[in-house]
Image: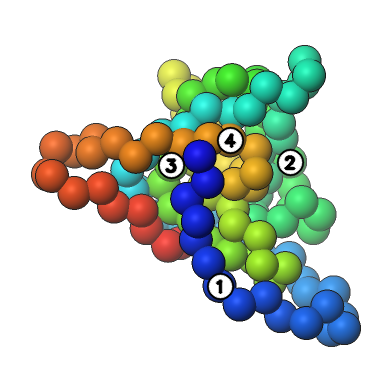
Amino acid sequence: MAFGVSAAIAPSAQAAPQAECWTPQANGEGRGHMYWNGGWGYNLKSGPYQSGCWDIGWVQQESMIYLHCWTKNSYGNTWWYVRVAGTNMYGWTSEDNFWGDSIDENGDGQISFYQC
């Protein structure tokens, strides 16, 4: 399930943007599972970009992840800062790599997705 975060996309005639890699502090709710991708897993990145940010971890397909916060990068793609369930591994993954569940994990009656 995509979460449908929307924003305007900048024209592509501009020079390639510089990748911004950072570690956010937000801790929202929700979890997801990495898609099956034919026997491979996914790299977790140091920021919300496929190129320009380091690979900092690897997560197997179908693994559960906890969603902390999301952002749109300068290409208009939505990325989530996540933690891999059962580990202390954190990193960024594209929203295209997983399906998510809206879960009220802290029991306050609200489901909060935070923007990083």
Q: In the image shown, does 71 or 110 lie closer to the viewer?
A: 110
Disc 3 element? strand
Q: Earlier in the sequence, mark 3 or mark 4?
A: 3
Q: In the image shown, does 61 or 24 lie closer to the viewer?
A: 61
Whether residue 105 is visible here, answered yes or no, is yes
Mark 1 and mark 4 in contact? Answer it, CB < 8 Å: no
Q: Earlier in the sequence, mark 1 or mark 4?
A: 1
Which amino acid is tagged 3? Leu
Residue lying at 66% horizontally and 32% vertically, measured from the top left:
57
Q: Residues within 10 Å of mark 1 (few under 14, many from 20)?
A: few
Query: x and y percent of residue 9 in the render?
Result: 67, 75
Disc 1 to disc 3, C-alpha distance: 20 Å
Disc 1 to disc 4, C-alpha distance: 20 Å
Which amino acid is tagged 2? Asp
Mark 2 and mark 3 in contact? Answer it, CB < 8 Å: no
Disc 2 to disc 4, C-alpha distance: 17 Å
Q: Earlier in the sequence, mark 2 or mark 4?
A: 2
Q: In front of the other: label 2 or label 4?
A: 4
Residue lying at 13% horizontally and 44% vertically, measured from the top left:
109
Residue lying at 50% horizontally and 56% vertically, measured from the top left:
4
Q: Earlier in the sequence, mark 1 or mark 2?
A: 1
Whether residue 90 is visible here, answered yes or no, is no
Q: In front of the other: label 2 or label 3?
A: 3
The residue beneath circle 4 is 98
The quarter of the picture where residue 16 lies is bottom right
The residue beneath circle 1 is 7
Disc 4 element? strand
Q: Earlier in the sequence, mark 2 or mark 3?
A: 2
